[in-house]
């Protein structure tokens, strides 16, 4: 003899289906949140990329600061040391003092084949 399905067994199956649907929905939401945390606008990959950019910019700033320090020192020397001005004029502009003679030496190819 077969038993007739009780009213409770039908609702039990419906509850299991509902519970399973909720579990799948939570799993899907969790997966979406995980993927967003990994590759989203403020995700892990973007954070790593921004940190690398930050390091590059930080090195650039340090380089610019070092150059500024050297330029300030050179400017201070040019304001206070007449010898520095003369050295710069000789080196950059090719100037000479009155009474000095300029000799320009050119390399000549050697005649012995060296």
Image: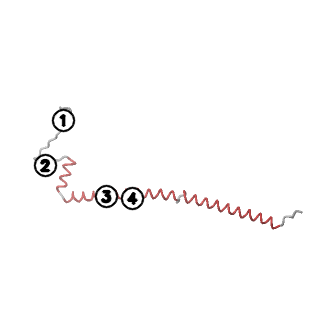
Q: Residue at x 12, y 44 (%)?
A: 101
Say which label, 4 or 3, has the lower sequence index. Answer: 4
Q: Residue at x 21, y 58 (%)?
A: 77
Which marked residue is nearer to the observer: mark 4 or mark 1?
A: 1
Residue under pointer 3:
66
Residue 58 is tagged as 4
Vertical side of 97 occupied by 73: above or below: below
Residue under pointer 1:
108
User: Mark 4 to mark 1: distance in Å?
Assistant: 50 Å
The kind of secondary structure element at disc 4 is: helix
Say which label, 4 or 1, has the lower sequence index. Answer: 4
Is 66 on the left-hand or right-hand side of 104? right
- Residue sitting farthest toward the bottom: 8
Is there CB contact under 8 Å for labels 4 and 3?
Answer: no
Look at the image and tell me in which quarter the N terminus lies. bottom right
User: Mark 4 to mark 2: distance in Å?
Assistant: 46 Å
User: Mark 4 to mark 3: distance in Å?
Assistant: 12 Å
Q: Residue at x 27, y 57 (%)?
A: 70
């Amino acid at each position: 003899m077969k038993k007739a399905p009780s009213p409770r067994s039908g609702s039990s199956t419906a509850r299991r289906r509902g519970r399973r649907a909720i579990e799948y929905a939570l799993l899907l939401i969790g997966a979406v949140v995980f993927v967003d945390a990994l590759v989203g606008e403020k995700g892990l990959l973007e954070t790593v990329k921004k940190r690398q950019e930050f390091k590059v910019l930080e090195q650039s700033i340090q380089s610019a600061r070092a150059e500024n320090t050297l330029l300030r020192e050179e400017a201070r020397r040019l304001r206070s040391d007449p010898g520095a001005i003369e050295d710069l004029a000789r080196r950059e502009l090719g100037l000479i003092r009155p009474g000095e003679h300029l000799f320009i030496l050119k390399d000549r190819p050697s005649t012995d084949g060296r």
